[in-house]
Amino acid sequence: MLNRLENLPTHKRGRIVKVDGGNGALSNFESLGLEIGDEVEVTGKFPHNGAIPLRKENEDLSIGKGLASKIIIDTDEEIIISLDKAKVGDQLKVVKVKSDGEIRRRLLDMGLVKDAELEIVRSAPLGDPIEVMLNGFNLSLRLKEAEGIFVKFVDLNQEANRNGWYK
């Protein structure tokens, strides 16, 4: 299953298949001694946008969150993430809605139920809110609401617009 390195859980392994970035990202990737086809394991996570510690064979290294979001990996198992972590253009399937009370009821009423497919259409310039296409209509969600919606990837948009506002 293809995913982004930033989404790989701690102590899970994945094989690098692509760097989805420009020359700068590729240069940073190579300067860390990484190559396409390398198998890496995430050894820990730092909160927010901190570095992600990795292990490649017997070598420990640390990679920034921005570069990790551009490295596409292949894993044996499905990775479930919260909706707020998805990128523009990603096609996803809802696994679980873990909100409470009135918010949960409204999300379920709008069609955010298990196995519903959706696509991230765009995000506001500062990232909040995000817009998703669901059952033929566009739905805007605050990041706080999106944190409680857990999804798995149906199709990973490897050409995602990093700014997110326009496709």
Image (cartoon, rainbow, N blue to C red):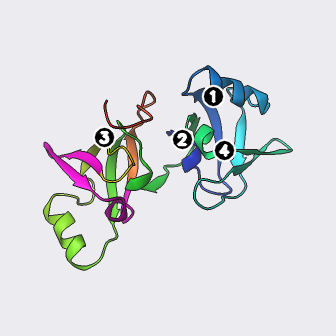
* Mark 4 and mark 2 residues within 8 Å of each other at the beta carbon: no
Residue 59: where, in percent of width, then height? 85, 43
Q: Crowding near pointer 1: few (<14 within 10 Å), some, many (20+)? A: some
**Residue 138 within the segment the image draws in magenta:** yes
* Residue hosting label 3: 122
Asked if 115 appears above or below 96 in the picture, the reply is above
Query: Nearer the N terminus, badge 2 or badge 3?
Result: 2
Query: Which amino acid lies under the numbered mark 2 shown in the image of this protein?
Result: Arg
Q: CA distance from mark 2 to mark 1?
A: 14 Å
Asked if 74 appears above or below 106 in the picture, the reply is above
Query: Nearer the N terminus, badge 1 or badge 4?
Result: 1
Does residue 16 show up? yes
The residue furthest bottom is 101
* Residue hosting label 2: 4
Query: Nearer the N terminus, badge 2 or badge 1?
Result: 2
* Mark 2 and mark 1 residues within 8 Å of each other at the beta carbon: no
Query: Which amino acid lies under the numbered mark 4 shown in the image of this protein?
Result: Gly
* Residue hosting label 4: 64
Residue 32 lies in what quarter of the image? top right
Asked if 43 appears above or below 76 in the picture, the reply is below
Q: Which residues are magenta?
A: 130-150
Q: Crowding near pointer 4: few (<14 within 10 Å), some, many (20+)? A: some
Q: CA distance from mark 2 to mark 3?
A: 18 Å
Does residue 35 show up? no
The residue furthest top is 23
Q: Quadrant of the C terminus?
A: top left
Q: CA distance from mark 4 to mark 3?
A: 24 Å
* Residue hosting label 1: 25
Q: Residue at x 36, y 64 (%)?
A: 144
Q: Residue at x 80, y 30 (%)?
A: 33
